[in-house]
Image (cartoon, rainbow, N blue to C red):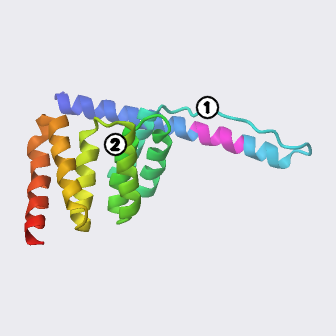
Amino acid sequence: MGKDKVLDAAYQKKVKSLKFRVKSFKIIFYLIAFSLLTSCSLPRIIILDDPLSPEEHINLGVTYEKKGEIDNALREYRLASKKLPLAYLYMGNIYIQKNDFDEAESAYRKAIKKDSQNADAHNNLAWLYYKKKENLNEAEELVLKAIELNPSKKDIYQDTLIKIRELKGQK
């Protein structure tokens, strides 16, 4: 069996495990909600621990995103963002897909604020400004910062920089 098939099988197993854990969590939640609604006494507040780690929420969000279920993906990224700043980058990407540029900008800014070393967040915010045709000087600075933070992705970030500079030249 090739390495890709082994990785794919492991990934599928992890996705099944995540889905099972989410279903288990939902069943417990509904049972508790039902018992609260049908009891005669005053309801008690019960706090349940989330069975998924932030990384698992990210992975589940990516799975939803690949299936085109962007609202479900966004929900998972929001859950992950409580403890994992990287989730804001993923949220920004979803908002871009939804053409909600204000929310995308907010998410990218949070990603940068919570992890100033996140080169992708710098680049994606710059790309957003390019798409909106605004803040082009800041966009250029953001891309240059991304290149400084992660030189291994210079070619990717350079594409953003070239497009921004071309647009600045047109104005």
Q: Nearer the viewer, residue 136 or 56?
A: 136
Q: Position of residue 86 (x, y in %)?
A: 36, 39
Identity of the residue drawn at 55% across and 32% down: 51
Q: Position of residue 131 (x, y in %)?
A: 23, 65
Up-down: is 46 above or below 158?
Answer: above
Q: Amino acid at mark 1?
A: Asp
Q: Position of residue 159 (x, y in %)?
A: 10, 53
Please give the residue where the numbered disc 1 appears in the rendered image. 49
Q: Residue 169, located in which quarter of the rendered image?
A: bottom left
Q: Residue 43, located in which quarter of the rendered image?
A: top right
Q: Residue 163, located in which quarter of the rendered image?
A: bottom left
Q: Quadrant of the C terminus?
A: bottom left
Up-down: is 100 above or below 157?
Answer: below
Q: Nearer the viewer, residue 72 or 47?
A: 47
Q: Earlier in the sequence, mark 1 or mark 2?
A: 1
Mark identifier at residue 112: 2
Up-down: is 3 above or below 39?
Answer: above
Mark identifier at residue 10: none
Q: Nearer the viewer, residue 122 or 61?
A: 122
Q: Position of residue 126 (x, y in %)?
A: 23, 54
Say left or right for 6 vs 160.
right
Secondary element at tag 2: helix
Residue 62 in magenta? Answer: no
Secondary element at tag 1: loop
Identity of the residue drawn at 26% across and 59% down: 128
Q: Amino acid at mark 2?
A: Ile
Say whether marks 1 and 2 touch (CB < 8 Å). no
Say left or right for 155 vs 71.
left
The secondary structure that most of the magenta stretch takes on is helix
Identity of the residue drawn at 50% across and 38% down: 82
Q: Which residues are magenta?
A: 24-31
